[in-house]
């Protein structure tokens, strides 16, 4: 992904990276006073755009998040709003900049008390931002509990207080915001659940940090967007023929035949030149009857893996998918393992999903050792837990901040040598080299049986057309989300490949370079 420019708006910054960006901005001549003034103004502007004059309570915390709050309070008051301000902390411990804005506030400074909420129409949550280090307790926690109970609209400064901006974890409890205004770039915690579900509308404000500060940081995390990979998207060549678009091979089991059929059809829809589905003889007739554009190859009983290997002797089969409906019961599990290992030994692009992952639950290292070429694994949380039991959160380490989805996907990619697509509402795509992308366009309608099989097919089809595994995974996950939005409520997995052409048409209009 040579085009993942360091200054992209899709870059995501952890709390410490944001701290470094702030420092570099200061070195580049932008004082913290100006940053804080701009941050507060951005919040006030966003509030003024969305709410009409009302009684607002600004809850300021002990750090610079509170500093932003002092600025917001003054600006809303200047705009004619009825503003009250409550502060938690000690003035002596405020940073010089926050102290300066504290003193600029000429109204009363009240103590935290849930009684303040009585006549409040809107709350500005400037309690804690990037400096949150532990669960909310005491008065802050009481306030959050009362905010949750009373459902007063909240605008959060940077993040809703209690969310870890780097991981999206909730420390203690969090009152959900209607609007969150963050600064410079989004943080992973805005996109990862549970954080994402608590931010409400998310606004990213420019506060004067020069984008050049990003060049000095070794940033590795992005929000998924075609901007990251559209230049490498494999559009058909004007003078091309089907073999220029790859020949994908899908293994299909004999019991759940729909899964691999969805995968095969989805690979065709996203542009693989040819797709062959290899099926055990017992189920061959089912596949042959059901499939039209997809070719069906027969694997003889008791030597299915050997027959599959023979198919692979044809090097035009340049991308392989194993897993959907492959089978795990009894001997099926052994067969699934053999087929996976046969695919991997070719070094060709391989997608491993579902049963292909679970079949290695007892000795994942055998699988990881076999990965020696481009490989994408697409576990949901259950499969991830089976394959990466050590990485995956156990109840004991559930509260460990490093144990977030982004970190887990990255570790899994590094450990296995494959691109790992850790699926869910906030799918993370991680590369063994450390890069990671968080997807944010997928609707909950995708939570339906077979939708993962379609995703595997999209990835397969892009791999067959020569896209790199990380790009193919990111592009496929984004397309999957877009098609989900296109179909909307009532979606079933079968709809996804059928509606892909509409999504591709819009994408092509927007992104196909001249
Ligand atoms: N840097 C910049 O240039 C800019 C930064 N900006 C703004 O600054 C924010 C970051 O500010 P920040 O680093 O001061 O952290 P912040 O979130 O205010 O909290 C730190 C304080 O909270 C305390 N504390 C922590 N957890 C706690 C708990 N559970 N319960 C109780 N206390 C707890 C902690 O105490 P300690 O852990 O040290 O004991 C410390 O006193 C950022 O989100 C953005 O809004 C903008 O103005 C733009 C320019
Ligand atoms: N709440 C959700 N919001 C958005 N996408 C979701 C949600 N739940 C599941 N998905 C997506 O739907 C797909 C489900 O895949 P998977 O669990 O493998 O299902 P199946 O095995 O039935 O095909 C994944 O791509 C996942 O990211
Ligand atoms: K906050």
Image (cartoon, rainbow, N blue to C red):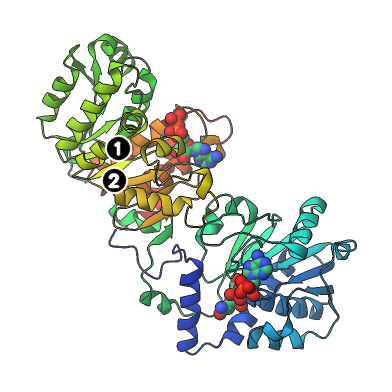
Element carrying mark 1: helix
Residue 349, by quadrant, is top left
Residue at figure coordinates x 68%, y 61% from the top left: 136
The residue lying at 37 percent from left, 49 percent from top is: 474
Decide which of tag 2 and tag 1 comes sooner along the chain: 1
Using the image as rendered, state which of residue 196 and residue 43 is in the foreground. 196
Q: Position of residue 215 (x, y in %)?
A: 36, 75
Q: Is residue 217 above or below residue 118?
A: below
Q: Residues at badges 2 and 1 in contact (C-beta under 8 Å)?
A: yes
Front-most of residues 327 and 359: 359
Q: Quadrant of the N terminus?
A: bottom left
- Residue behind mark 1: 364
Task: Name the residue rendered at 19%, 16% in the picture.
Answer: 299
Label 2: few (<14), some or many (≥20) within 10 Å?
Answer: many
Name the residue rendered at 27%, 14% in the picture.
Answer: 288
Residue at mark 2 to residue at mark 1: CA–CA distance: 9 Å
User: Residue 244 at what x, y percent from top left?
Assistant: 17, 41
Q: Is residue 511 left or right of residue 240?
A: right
Residue 52 quadrant: bottom right
Residue 289 seen anywhere in this rendered image of the structure: yes
Identify the image quadrant of the C terminus. Answer: bottom left
Query: Where is residue 3 drawn, in percent x and y?
Result: 31, 63
Residue furthest front in the image: 396
Figure check: 83 above or below 104: above
**Looking at the image, residue 305 lies above or below residue 487:** above
Residue placed under numbered mark 2 in the picture:
416
Where's residue 69, x and y in %? 71, 75
């Amino acid at each position: 992904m040579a085009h993942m420019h360091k200054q992209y708006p899709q870059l995501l910054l952890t709390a410490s990276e944001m701290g470094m960006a702030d420092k570099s901005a200061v070195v580049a001549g932008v004082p913290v006073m100006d940053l804080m003034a701009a941050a507060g103004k951005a919040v006030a502007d966003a509030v003024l755009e969305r709410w009409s004059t009302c009684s607002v309570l600004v809850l300021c915390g002990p750090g610079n998040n509170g500093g932003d709050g002092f600025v917001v309070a003054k600006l809303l008051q200047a705009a004619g709003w009825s503003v009250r301000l409550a502060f938690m902390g000690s003035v002596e411990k405020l940073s010089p900049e926050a102290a300066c804005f504290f003193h600029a506030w000429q109204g009363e400074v009240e103590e935290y008390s849930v009684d303040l909420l009585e006549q409040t129409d809107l709350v500005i949550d400037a309690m804690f931002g990037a400096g949150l280090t532990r669960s909310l307790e005491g008065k802050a926690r009481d306030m959050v509990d009362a905010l949750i109970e009373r459902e007063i609209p909240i605008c959060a400064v940077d993040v809703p207080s209690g969310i870890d901006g780097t991981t999206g974890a909730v420390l203690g409890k969090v009152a959900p915001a209607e609007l969150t205004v963050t600064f410079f770039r989004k943080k992973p915690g805005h996109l990862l659940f549970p954080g994402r579900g608590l931010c409400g509308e998310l606004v990213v404000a420019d506060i004067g940090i020069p984008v050049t500060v990003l060049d000095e940081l070794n940033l590795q995390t992005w929000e998924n967007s075609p901007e990251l990979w559209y230049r490498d998207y494999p559009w058909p060549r004007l003078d091309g023929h089907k073999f220029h678009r790859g020949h994908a091979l899908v293994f299909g089991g004999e019991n759940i035949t729909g899964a691999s059929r969805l995968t095969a059809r989805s690979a065709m829809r996203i542009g693989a030149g040819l797709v062959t589905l290899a099926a055990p003889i017992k189920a061959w007739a089912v596949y042959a009857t059901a499939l039209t554009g997809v070719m069906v190859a027969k694997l003889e009983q008791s030597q299915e893996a050997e027959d599959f290997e023979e198919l692979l002797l044809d090097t035009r089969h340049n991308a392989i998918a194993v897993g959907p409906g492959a089978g795990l019961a009894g001997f099926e599990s052994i067969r699934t393992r053999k087929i996976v290992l046969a695919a991997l030994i070719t070094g060709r692009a391989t997608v491993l999903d579902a049963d292909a992952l679970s079949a290695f639950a007892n000795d994942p290292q055998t699988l990881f050792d076999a990965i020696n070429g481009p490989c994408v694994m697409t576990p949901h949380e259950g499969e991830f837990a089976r394959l990466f039991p050590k990485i995956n959160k156990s109840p004991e380490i559930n509260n460990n901040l490093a144990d977030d989805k982004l970190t887990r996907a990255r570790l899994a990619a590094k450990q296995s040598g494959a691109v790992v697509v850790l699926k869910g509402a906030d799918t993370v795509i991680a590369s063994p080299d450390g890069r990671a992308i968080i997807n944010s366009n997928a609707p909950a309608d995708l939570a339906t049986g077979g939708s993962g099989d379609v995703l595997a097919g999209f990835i397969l089809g892009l791999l067959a057309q020569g896209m790199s595994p990380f790009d193919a995974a990111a592009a496929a996950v984004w397309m999957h989300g877009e098609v989900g939005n296109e179909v909307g409520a009532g979606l079933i997995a079968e709809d996804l490949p059928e509606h892909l052409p509409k999504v591709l048409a819009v994408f092509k209009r927007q992104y196909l370079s001249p």
